[in-house]
Image (cartoon, coloured by chain):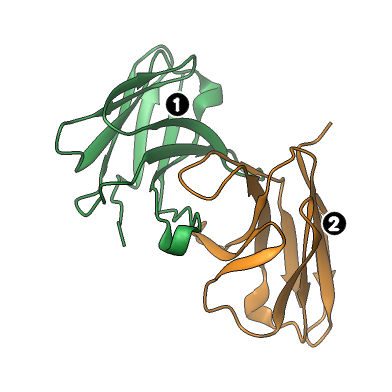
Chain colours: A green, B orange
Amino acid sequence: LAKTTQPISMDSYEGQEVNITCSHNNIATNDYITWYQQFPSQGPRFIIQGYKTKVTNEVASLFIPADRKSSTLSLPRVSLSDTAVYYCLVGDSPGGGNKLTFGTGTQLKVEL
Amino acid sequence: DTAVSQTPKYLVTQMGNDKSIKCEQNLGHDTMYWYKQDSKKFLKIMFSYNNKELIINETVPNRFSPKSPDKAHLNLHINSLELGDSAVYFCASSHGQVNTEAFFGQGTRLTVV
């Protein structure tokens, strides 16, 4: 069972780039790495997913080193509205079922 | 149009009561889930259904019984509610079972008094 470890909290200022790193030492060969964002009183929302190297979309970039034992979510030029909890997940599919095991998440606080 | 909708959004009830939470998704997904988020914000999967068939049951008390009448609906019935059941319950859906993006509902805040 792949487990993830990420910082409990991070602080940043508007306009800065934020990098949140997640450790997943026991990642399996078939596992993907997925990041979700959760605002207060809302359900988690998918941000980005990758398997190796680098993935970029309109919201974020995901950097995955060759050994895949960690990953870094990069949020360019954050704003106040990026204040949320960010979860790193590693695909966990016992018997073919998608389990989406959430860790403790990282509370990102963006200030002016 | 809300992709994954849950009702009710808030539910306050007394210990010992039986209650249900409904979930519907209009995304055409074949897999649906129930998650529980406790006061410490820890999200834990409870159940997962694929094509109306139960595929994950995470050591949830028997008082919790999911029912999937069709692929678009996954309801959660809870018997004999206890104080410890107070939490936010999230329904989610995805296409396929492996490493796919899941869409979550807005959550149902259950308070047992």
Question: Is residue B85 toward the left or the right of residue B10 in the image?
Answer: left
Numbered circles on residues, count: 2
Q: Where's residue A19, x and y in %? A: 30, 27
Q: Amino acid at mark 2?
A: Pro
Q: Where's residue A104, x and y in %? A: 40, 54
Tell me which corner region of the image, top left, top right, bottom left or bottom right, holds residue B94.
top right
Q: Amino acid at mark 1?
A: Val
| Residue at x 34%, y 47% (from the top left corner) | A8
Tell me which corner region of the image, top left, top right, bottom left or bottom right, holds residue B8.
bottom right
Q: What is the CA distance from the residue labelled 2 to the residue labelled 1?
A: 32 Å
Q: SS for tag 2? A: loop
| Residue at x 47%, y 58% (from the top left corner) | A96
Q: SS for tag 1? A: strand
- Is A47 above or below relative to A55? below
Residue B38 is at least partly visible in this image: no
| Residue at x 58%, y 78% (from the top left corner) | B60
Residue that label 1 marks: A110
